[in-house]
Amino acid sequence: MKFIVSILLSALFAYAVGIYGNLPWWSFVITNLIISVALNQTPGKSFLSGALGVGVLWLGLALVIDAQNQHILSVKVATLLPLKGSYTVLITITTLVGFLLGGLSALTGSFVRKS
């Protein structure tokens, strides 16, 4: 039960700090750390819950935003990067970055709680 609650809280707080305009984009890292300290889980479950919460959120947001503008922006950004205009690779990389940052921040919180 704590695992599912942790995933939902990670996604909720990552979204909440993301729409608040005065905070930097990486503010969800701090909220994931706090959630992981507050909910006592093993380091593996803590990493996975933080990673899934942020990774799935970023995937969903990237897909929705990309569909709303008919892939125009993502194709242009993928062309600037060495991705040969593949917006699917760009979305995959975006999801992977969110997954890793969310998981590593939650893992850090788990280790902080243990120490």
Image: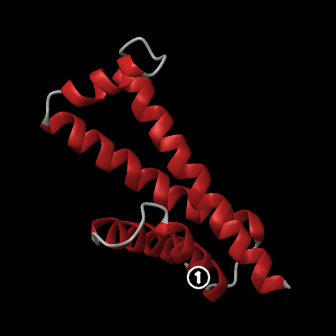
**Which quarter shows the N terminus?**
bottom right
- Write the residue at 28% across / 39% down: 63
**Displayed quadrant of residue 88:** top left
Q: Position of residue 102 (x, y in %)?
A: 57, 60
Q: Residue furthest top?
A: 84
Q: What residue is disc 1 on? A: 34
- Write the residue at 69% across / 84% down: 40
> Residue type at mark 1?
Ile
**Displayed quadrant of residue 21:** bottom left
Mark 1 element type: helix
- Write the residue at 42% across / 60% down: 25
Q: Is residue 93 left or right of residue 77?
A: right
Q: Position of residue 49 (x, y in %)?
A: 58, 64
**Displayed quadrant of residue 106:** bottom right
**Which quarter shows the C terminus?**
bottom right
Query: Vertically, is 34 above or below 4?
Result: below
Q: How many marks?
A: 1
The crowding category of the residue bearing disc 1, from other C-alpha atoms within 10 Å (few below 14, some 14 to 19, many at least 20), is some
